[in-house]
């Protein structure tokens, strides 16, 4: 019985640690996006907040400003158990945006939904 309890405690602690790491990664990704959006808005003021793809590597112009990694510049990126979602909030040019990080499997990959 004692060994079974130790295994259960270890697995529970391991899951809690993984969830905490996933949540920290999701929050860090949202912060990276926010910094990139500010940079993009300054560099391309007439375009507004276009898309995550426009933040990624490439031509270093307003089509691909190269301010986030290729992983984060995907249309619907997934990182460490979280789907990162971009929502422009106004007509073109988008004057504002919302970013969210949604756990792929709540309770297993993460507990929280994060918005920015």
Image: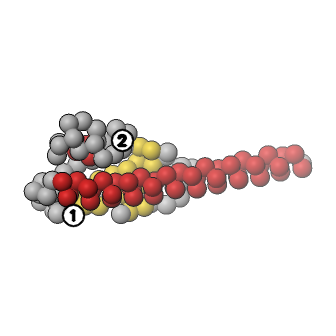
Picture quarter containing residue 69? Answer: top left
Q: Secondary structure at mark 1?
A: loop
Residue 111 relative to residue 50: left or right: right
Number of on-image labels: 2
Residue found at the far right of this picture: 2
- C-alpha distance separating marks 1 and 2: 22 Å
* Residue occupying image coordinates x 35% and y 63%: 116
- Mark 1–mark 2 contact, CB under 8 Å? no
Question: In the rendering, at what x and y percent does residue 66 appear?
Answer: 28, 42
- When the figure is inspected, residue 95 is found, relative to residue 19, above or below; the finding is below
Residue 43 relative to residue 105: left or right: left
Few, some or many residues within 10 Å of mark 2 (<14, 14–19, 20+): few
Residue 26 relative to residue 71: left or right: right
Mark with earlier residue (1, 2) = 2
Residue found at the far top of this picture: 58
* Residue occupying image coordinates x 17% and y 43%: 61
Foreground: 90 or 57?
A: 57
Quickly name the residue at label 2.
69
Q: Secondary structure at mark 2?
A: loop
Q: Mark number for residue 96? A: 1
Picture quarter containing residue 74? Answer: top left
């Amino acid at each position: 019985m004692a060994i079974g309890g130790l295994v259960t405690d270890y697995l529970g602690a391991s899951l809690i640690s993984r969830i905490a790491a996933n949540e920290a990664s999701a929050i860090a990704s949202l912060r990276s996006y926010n910094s990139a959006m500010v940079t993009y808005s300054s560099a391309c003021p007439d375009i507004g907040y276009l898309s995550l793809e426009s933040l990624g590597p490439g031509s270093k112009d307003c089509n691909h400003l190269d301010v986030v990694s290729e992983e984060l510049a995907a249309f619907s990126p997934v990182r460490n158990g979280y789907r990162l979602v971009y929502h422009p909030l106004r007509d073109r040019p988008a004057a504002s945006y919302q970013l969210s990080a949604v756990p792929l499997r709540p309770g297993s990959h993460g507990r929280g939904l994060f918005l920015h």
